[in-house]
Image (cartoon, helix red, strand yellow):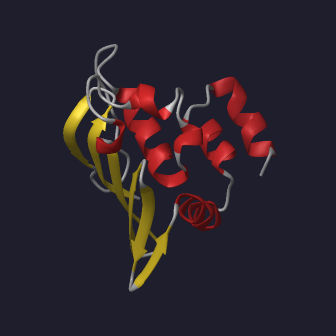
């Protein structure tokens, strides 16, 4: 369950925090309001820059240094709270009294935790109705 998503210089969000309620959450807004950006930021936090639609430098808010981009995601699975902070300089995942550091290490931990690869997670998050069946067939 997603708890919070904090964006610093991620696309049009220079400094934004989104808090998610328990249960089903619907994100609604006009075209170009940043709805897909939220999903992309979640994927970036969990799995890194390979999940972005564009290069990392293209995702940074216009006229801001690439090093200023930060995404923080807090979520809970099976009663355990997790927090991932990711930016160009590195990634860190904290839970209980444990800490996972490093871009690849954080991605690998997230894949094990979620029980799917980053590519499958991306397909599920941005799947249209016709493609969900194929994604689910991949396990």
- Kindly identify the residue that appears in the image at 30 percent across and 28 percent down: 61
Percent coordinates x, y for residue 31 in the rendering: 34, 13
User: From what the image shows, is residue 72 above or below residue 44?
Assistant: below
Q: Which sits in the foreground, 103 or 120?
A: 103
Whether residue 120 sits left or right of residue 102 in the image: it is right
Percent coordinates x, y for residue 48 in the rendering: 53, 48
- Kindly identify the residue that appears in the image at 29 percent across and 15 percent down: 30
Task: Report the residue that reaches farthest toward the bottom.
Answer: 97
Percent coordinates x, y for residue 14 in the rendering: 21, 34
The total number of labels drawn is: 0
User: From what the image shows, is residue 42 above or below residue 53?
Assistant: below
Task: Report the residue that reaches farthest toward the top.
Answer: 31
Task: Determine which quarter of the picture holds residue 58.
Answer: top left
User: From what the image shows, is residue 95 above or below residue 24?
Assistant: below
Q: Quadrant of the N terminus?
A: bottom left
- Kindly identify the residue that appears in the image at 64 percent across and 66 percent down: 112
- Kindly identify the residue that appears in the image at 66 percent across and 62 percent down: 115
Percent coordinates x, y for residue 32 in the rendering: 33, 16
């Amino acid at each position: 369950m997603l708890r919070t998503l904090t964006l610093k210089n991620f696309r049009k969000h220079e400094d934004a925090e989104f808090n998610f309620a328990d249960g089903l959450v619907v994100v609604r807004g006009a075209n170009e309001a940043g709805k897909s950006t939220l999903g992309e930021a979640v994927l970036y936090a969990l799995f890194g820059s390979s999940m972005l639609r564009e290069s990392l430098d293209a995702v940074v808010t216009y006229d801001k240094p690439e090093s200023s981009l930060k995404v923080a995601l807090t979520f809970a699975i099976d009663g355990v709270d997790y927090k991932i902070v990711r930016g160009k300089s590195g990634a860190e995942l904290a839970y209980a009294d444990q800490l996972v550091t490093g871009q690849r290490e954080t991605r690998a931990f997230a894949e094990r935790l979620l029980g799917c690869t980053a590519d499958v997670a991306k397909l599920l998050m941005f799947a249209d109705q016709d493609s969900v069946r194929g994604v689910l067939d991949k396990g």
